[in-house]
Image (spheres, rainbow, N blue to C red):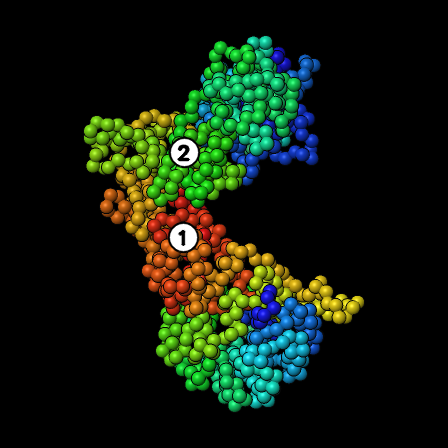
């Protein structure tokens, strides 16, 4: 056990975590040049397409250090985007140390701080690493100052590297071995294995990722989930080494996988502890703090026949994304579905995409909402994150919406545009602070609803990509809210209604009407789209019917082509929802959700 | 295929003297291939005559069949009659270009047994004819119809085009009135469709002209239907009108009634009730396939030498969809029994009736004129 080192690579988004992981993996001789591809641990298609890490990934490496001993390292590459911070916090629970990367040109950013605090909470050894020193804009001295002043770490202990160019990799390995402590635990004690992730394999059942804190586990053992008592016989254990590598056993201090023919998806819960059925541990390992959903949206199958399949898909999906919360929901327009909680809008987008791509679901998601609080005149307090349950306005005494404190770090020259952006988004009580020359940190108190919508995209665009931001929930505050309903041919479409601040109501209503106008295909009759508060129409658009829909000629040679067109349209119809007599395509629901016009 | 059913026989003549800029039919302007084409066609007929031994409609379409020299037309008709029994009361149609129709040509066509002539007049307005790139004038069109009557054609169909860029209601009415002066037995009135890959498509895209607006197309359609109905022409299919029921195109109706047809010649499609297949598009490809390989045994023609371009075996579901979509293009409409095989059909029928697009009787659902104007979307309303 003295030769084991468990560590995560953490950093702000894009500071080079996955690229550094590549170098470590190659250095350890794990991947030959033919198999290798950049950001090799980003193995999901969406990660590769978007160029960001979404899931934490484990990789076991062997390293022979200068002291001549062979060390067993377990590296975890983590995501940098704030919406996936739950992935980071769970990764940290299996580690004794972290490499905290800082981009030599960008310096310390919002997520650098947030991740540092998370690592400190777990009492981990922190090795600051200044990455991208090969960049012409790299300013190592300045970044060292920031590490000292902003992070409060010893700048002299910081390593310098270029993950891309492969500079400074040996030093990193040596520092991992020398500075990160080995895990503790007793291989002979009763088993305590913390589940920090899982995924479902159709052939082998649930594949559990866990950290062994105490004891030993091997094939043939009967294990028990401590939260629900379910027992299984272990088929396989091993470690992650780009693929699963079978080992004889896993012992205290190790990170690896367990396969035990688990077909009942719901038995496995991330955060639960696995013990040995015959020789159980007295207590479970401290699990994870439940993630706090920030954004809520409902998901419905496009065809109600697909509801059972969605139920199953969500259950399996949740195994692999512990941050998703969901519960049953139903809508007059869209039928049975689920209300889901997400850590942010990107998270929502990823969930939607993964459900469609990995689980073949055709789904519709409703406009995202935050959690509002209402005090009714009868004294009752209610929490509403779904516009469907917006209380009768005449009964509301006090309405409150969630506020966050946001922190934005930018080069000073963007201060003006960022201030304006924040004020436009109802930002209050601004504070400034200059972490180092030329850079400024701006704090604002702002309604969460204003940032979940499209704030991050806007910030990126006004700062040409230089703005980084983080936020913390600070509580609910009184606000003037209204519910904007969307009516299609005078029928309210519950799934399209939104709760917004009074001042934004007209603009949002109009925007939704316009987007629907663009996305709903013309039909045989006129379609009127309206936005309304109570009975008052605040926005409106119309879609004229088509007047003619017939091809002039249809003879022997035209029939196949015409039928194929009809078949294609038929397929398209499957992606439509009937609301009253109007067919609304899935695209229309999605367009309402989209933040910026493409 | 049951032997007692007569099929419709279509022969595609892939030649035109000049190409019209709106047309996306397959045709070639190089008449040098005619000889080889007729030889290839003869072989194709030989191959299919066992499975399609008889026909009660024969349709020579194109292209421009009348662009063929007399000898070639004679050869083709001889090959057909030699192998396939054409019933005595068969409808035998040829598509004709007005300025091919000399008295001599017409006499020859009569002698070959053609009893129905479909003349591509398109317009009686010289400016419109020029715009359409047609090689005849309005006068030539008038004269050709007179000649055809003289030659003894008692079933004449006139093809007209409307909803042309810049066409006025008055202009179109004048063309219709001129056509009616000849009391044609049948009229096909096609709205101009601008198809991708044609010169017109590029013109429209480069805004060289302004295509007719959809709203105007719709009005033109309703007007044309009412105008001709009032004058005794039954609007029996989206683009087709007949002076009496017996003058409805028998061959073309087979397509709409989902009956069997054999199509010969480049790009022609065939349907045997279950399978549809089609020939290669190009004349050269067609000829080469049929005549390229010398046969070891000349009397056995192998399937491999057929100029197949593709085929599909239709599922029951696809057959049902086709029957529906085709039926909804005609005033015969479609049997209720058939419609009711689609999910939620009775609700859809009710709704379409309420919208004034369908009339539901005891055993059929028939589109109204407005329904014909929206025929494609009617079909879509039933499928899900
Ligand atoms: N010049 C230079 N570029 C680097 C270096 N390390 C990483 N990059 C580039 O920085 C970009 C982001 O790298 P990633 O490794 O995907 O960053 P990450 O921290 O894993 O990003 P997330 O997972 O999305 O948080 C890529 O374009 C890399 O090629 C480096 O040392 N030098
Ligand atoms: S004559 Fe007929 S087939 Fe030939 S190009 Fe013109 S429209 Fe097309
Ligand atoms: Mg990454």
**Chain containing the residue with disc 2:** A
Secondary element under disc 1, as helix, strand or loop, is: loop
User: Where, quadrant-wise, is the N terminus of chain B in this rendering?
Assistant: bottom right
Ligand 2's image quarter is bottom right
Say if residue A247 shows up in the picture.
yes
Residue B50 found in image quarter: bottom right
- Most foreground residue, B109 or A156: B109
Q: Which percent across, then down, holds residue B332? A: 43, 68
Residue B150, placed above or below residue A50: below
Q: Which percent across, then down, holds residue A76? A: 56, 24
Secondary element under disc 2, as helix, strand or loop, is: strand
Q: Residues within 10 Å of mark 2 (few under 14, many from 20)?
A: many
Left of B252 or right of it: where is A62? Answer: right
| Residue highlighted by disc 2 | A340
Q: Residue at x 46, y 41 (%)?
A: A306
| Residue highlighted by disc 1 | B344
Residue A523, placed above or below residue A285: below
Q: Residue at x 51, y 23 (%)?
A: A196
Say if residue B105 shows up in the picture.
no
Q: Are marks 1 and 2 on the same chain?
A: no
């Amino acid at each position: 056990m003295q030769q084991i080192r468990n560590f995560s690579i953490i950093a702000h988004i894009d500071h080079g975590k996955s690229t550094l992981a590549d170098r470590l993996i190659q250095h350890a001789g794990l991947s030959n040049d033919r198999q290798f591809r950049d950001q090799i641990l980003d193995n999901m298609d969406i990660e590769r397409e978007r160029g960001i890490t979404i899931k934490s990934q484990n990789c076991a490496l062997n390293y022979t250090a200068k002291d001549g001993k062979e060390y067993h390292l377990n590296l975890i590459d983590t995501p940098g985007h704030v919406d996936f911070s739950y992935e980071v916090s769970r990764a940290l629970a299996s580690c004794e140390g972290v490499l905290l990367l800082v981009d030599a040109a960008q310096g310390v950013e919002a997520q650098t701080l947030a991740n540092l605090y998370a690592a400190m909470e777990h009492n981990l050894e922190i090795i600051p690493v200044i990455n991208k020193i090969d960049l012409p804009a790299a300013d190592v001295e300045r970044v060292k100052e920031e590490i000292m002043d902003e992070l409060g770490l010893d700048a002299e202990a910081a390593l310098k590297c270029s993950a891309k160019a492969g500079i400074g990799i040996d030093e990193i390995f040596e520092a991992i071995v020398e500075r990160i402590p080995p895990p503790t635990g007793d291989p002979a004690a009763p088993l305590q294995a913390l589940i920090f992730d899982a995924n479902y394999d159709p052939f082998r059942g649930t594949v559990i990722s866990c950290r062994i804190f105490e004891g030993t586990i091997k094939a043939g053992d009967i294990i028990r989930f401590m939260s629900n008592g379910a027992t299984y016989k272990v088929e396989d254990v091993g470690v992650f080494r780009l693929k699963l590598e079978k080992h004889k056993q896993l012992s205290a201090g190790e990170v690896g996988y367990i396969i035990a023919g688990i077909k009942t998806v719901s038995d496995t819960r991330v955060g639960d502890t696995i013990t040995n059925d015959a020789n159980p541990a007295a207590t479970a390992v401290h699990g994870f703090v439940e993630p706090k959903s920030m954004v809520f949206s409902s998901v419905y199958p496009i065809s109600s026949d697909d509801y059972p399949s969605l139920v199953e898909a969500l259950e399996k999906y949740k195994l692999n994304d512990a941050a998703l919360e969901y519960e049953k929901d139903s809508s007059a327009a869209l039928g049975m579905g689920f209300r889901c909680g997400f850590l942010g809008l990107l998270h929502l987008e990823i969930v939607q995409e993964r459900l469609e791509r990995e689980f073949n679901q055709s789904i519709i998601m409703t406009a995202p909402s935050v959690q509002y609080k209402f005090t009714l005149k009868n004294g009752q307090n209610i929490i509403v994150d779904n516009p469907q349950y917006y209380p009768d306005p005449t009964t509301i005494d006090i309405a409150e919406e969630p506020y966050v404190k946001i922190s934005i770090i930018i080069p000073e020259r963007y201060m003006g545009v960022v201030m304006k952006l924040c004020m436009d988004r109802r930002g209050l009580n601004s504070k400034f602070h200059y972490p180092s020359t030329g850079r400024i940190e701006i704090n604002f108190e702002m309604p969460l609803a204003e940032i979940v919508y499209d704030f991050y995209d806007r910030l990126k665009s006004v700062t040409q990509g230089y703005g980084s931001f983080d936020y913390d929930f600070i509580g609910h505050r009184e606000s003037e809210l209204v519910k904007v309903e969307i009516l299609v041919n005078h029928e309210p479409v519950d799934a399209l209604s939104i709760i917004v601040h009074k001042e934004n109501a007209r603009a949002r209503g109009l925007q939704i009407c316009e987007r629907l106008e663009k996305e709903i295909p013309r039909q045989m009759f006129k379609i009127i789209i309206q936005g309304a508060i109570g009975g008052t129409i605040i926005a409106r658009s119309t879609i004229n019917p088509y007047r003619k829909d017939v091809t002039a000629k249809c003879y022997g040679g035209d029939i196949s082509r015409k039928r194929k067109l009809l078949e294609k349209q038929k397929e398209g119809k499957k992606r439509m929802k009937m609301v009253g007599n109007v067919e609304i395509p899935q695209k229309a629901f999605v367009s309402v959700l989209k933040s910026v016009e493409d | 295929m049951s032997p007692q059913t007569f099929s419709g026989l279509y022969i595609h003549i892939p030649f035109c003297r000049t190409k019209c800029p709106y047309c996306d039919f397959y045709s070639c302007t190089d008449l040098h291939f005619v000889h080889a084409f007729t030889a290839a066609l003869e072989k194709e007929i030989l191959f299919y005559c066992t499975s399609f031994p008889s026909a009660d409609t024969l349709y020579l379409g194109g292209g421009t069949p009348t662009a063929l020299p007399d000898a070639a037309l004679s050869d083709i008709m001889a090959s057909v009659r030699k192998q396939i029994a054409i019933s005595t009361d068969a409808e035998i149609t040829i598509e004709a270009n007005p300025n091919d129709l000399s008295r001599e040509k017409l006499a020859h066509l009569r002698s070959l047994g053609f009893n129905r002539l479909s003349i591509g007049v398109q317009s009686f307005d010289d400016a419109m004819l020029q715009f359409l790139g047609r090689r005849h004038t309005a006068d030539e069109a008038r004269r050709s119809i007179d000649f055809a009557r003289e030659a003894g054609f008692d079933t004449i169909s006139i093809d007209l085009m409307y909803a042309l860029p810049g066409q006025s209601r008055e202009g179109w009415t004048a063309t219709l009135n001129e056509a009616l002066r000849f009391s044609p037995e049948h009229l096909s009135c096609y709205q101009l469709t601008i198809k991708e890959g044609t010169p017109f498509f590029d013109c429209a895209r480069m805004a060289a002209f302004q295509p007719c607006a959809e709203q105007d197309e719709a009005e033109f359609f309703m007007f044309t239907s009412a105008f001709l109905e009032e004058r005794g022409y039954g609007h029996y299919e989206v683009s087709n009108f007949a002076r009496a029921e017996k003058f409805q195109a028998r061959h073309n109706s087979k397509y709409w009634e989902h009956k069997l047809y054999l199509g010969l010649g480049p790009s022609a499609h065939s349907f045997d009730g279950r399978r549809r297949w089609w020939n290669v598009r190009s004349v050269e490809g067609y000829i080469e396939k049929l005549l390229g390989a010398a046969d070891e045994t000349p009397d056995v023609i192998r399937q491999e030498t057929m100029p197949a371009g593709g085929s599909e075996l239709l599922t029951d579901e696809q057959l049902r969809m086709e029957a529906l979509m085709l039926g909804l293009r005609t005033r015969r409409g479609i049997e209720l029994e058939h419609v009711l095989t689609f999910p939620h059909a009775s609700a859809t029928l009710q709704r379409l009736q309420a919208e004034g697009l369908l009339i539901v009787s005891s055993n059929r659902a028939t589109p109204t004129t407005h329904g014909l104007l929206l025929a494609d979307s009617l079909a879509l309303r039933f499928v899900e």
